[in-house]
Image (cartoon, grey):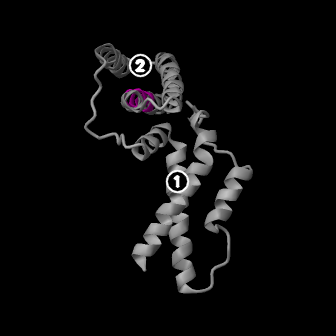
Amino acid sequence: MSKMLSYRATARFHDVFRCVWHDLFTKPVSTRHNGSQASLPSGPTCLSSRRLVGQGKAVNTKKEQNIAAAQSSVLNAAYRTLLSPVLRAQYILTQEGFEPSETDKLTDQELVMEIMEAREELDEAETLENIERIRSENGGKVEEMYASIAKLIGEMKWEDARDAVVKLKYLEGIQSAAEDKWHTLSR
């Protein structure tokens, strides 16, 4: 029974993911330095996705509760995947047989140097203005990488897309570190 439930839950994940990923891939979640604000559309697409897994329905039996819990878990996993451009791209690449690995390394030496310099500059930054400048510069690179990945995936250039995802991970790491430091200094 649990194997069948797992299969159904996985199938639901793919159904939910397919129904909304395309609309969301080119619309990254906005974040602001004064706090993260994540928003995804709540329009017809999301509502139909919730109906697809039966979210919000009353459950009476233990079996229905288990199924509802499994479906809710799948929907939450799909939501988390859609929320993150990196996870969205990794999911698509995996579906196309180009699964990114945790051991994928950055091969662009120029970008490696930029990242090292940005990290060093961030470590030395002592004012909110310096951190905001680093965030802004890096944010532009992140936005460019989002567009590049969307284009590469649209053109089905899977290996190039996988390389771009590795770059994006590093750039998002700088962004996250900058936001953390901004929050620390703003207290």
Residue lying furthest bottom in this view? 61
The 10 Å Cα crowd at callout 1, few under 14, some 14 to 19, many 20 or more, is: many
Q: Tag on residue 126?
A: 2
Query: Can you give x and y, in whole percent of width and height, for residue 11 in the image?
Result: 50, 62
Residue ID for mark 1: 78
Q: Which residues are magenta?
A: 167-177
Instruction: Let me know if residue 27 is in the magenta part.
Output: no
Looking at the rendering, which quadrant does residue 16 occupy? bottom right
Q: Please say whether residue 133 is visible from this viewpoint.
A: yes
How many numbered dots are placed on residues in this image? 2
Mark 1 falls on what kind of element?
helix
Please tell me which residue lies in front, 64 or 118. 64
**Residue 171 covered by magenta stretch:** yes
Residue drawn at the location 54% of the way across and 25% of the way down: 147
Q: What residue type is disc 1 on? A: Ala
Residue 67: image location, x then y, percent:
53, 75
Checking the image for residue 172, the label placed there is none
Q: Nearer the viewer, residue 137 or 99?
A: 99
The quarter in which the N terminus is drawn is bottom left
Q: Residue at x 41, y 76 (%)?
A: 2
71 to the left or right of 167: right
Label 2 amino acid?
A: Glu
C-alpha span from label 1 to label 2: 39 Å
